[in-house]
Amino acid sequence: MYTWHSKAVGDGVAAFQPAMQLHQAFLTMATTSGGVPANAAVFSHYDLHANVVTWYFSPEAESLGKAFGATPCEKPTPSKGFGLLVGDARSWEAHFPGYVASRRRR
């Protein structure tokens, strides 16, 4: 199954502590459970107008998303304020082919 998960974590300030916990959980997963699945990533989107940070867990990071209370959602569409929070930089191309290259051309 190819299901994305998301979780709204509050404004930029409120999201800081949970982001630190997410980074630690990702590192723990990398070192204790046989490694991180290929293309496992968490992307973050800051909606300036709503003042809300939302995390998007790739399907390969589903277990991590569930551990943080994320719920199933549609695959996000990258836009302004969207970035890779944790995971390998190659996750960009794996999940959003051509997006990074198109951003460089602007």
Image: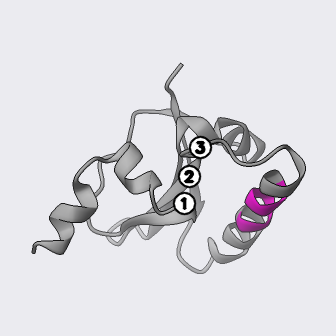
Amino acid type of disc 2? Ala
* Residue 63 vs residue 73, the one in the foreground: 63
User: Which residue is located at x 56 percent, y 54 percent?
Assistant: 42
**Is 17 rendered above or below residue 29?**
below
Q: Name the residue under label 1.
A: 88
- State the separation of the CA atoms marked 1 and 2: 7 Å
In the image, the segment drawn in magenta is: 23-28
* Residue 41 vs residue 65, the one in the foreground: 41
Kind of element beneath mark 3: loop
Horizontal arrangement in the rendering, residue 39 relative to residue 82 (left or right): right
Whether residue 25 appears in magenta in the rendering, the answer is yes
Amino acid type of disc 1? Asp
Amino acid type of disc 3? Ala
For the N terminus, the image quarter is: top right
* Residue 62 vs residue 39, the one in the foreground: 39
Identify the disc placed on residue 38. Answer: 3
Q: Mark 2 points at which residue?
A: 41
**Is 1 rendered above or below residue 47?**
above
* Residue at the outermost right position: 32
User: Which residue is located at x 54 percent, y 65 percent?
Assistant: 85
Q: Is the magenta stretch mostly helix, strand or loop?
A: helix
Q: Are marks 1 and 2 in contact (CB under 8 Å)?
A: yes
1 or 2: mark nearer the eye = 1
Kind of element beneath mark 1: loop
- Image coords of residue 33 (percent x, y): 86, 44
Name the quadrant containing residue 28: bottom right
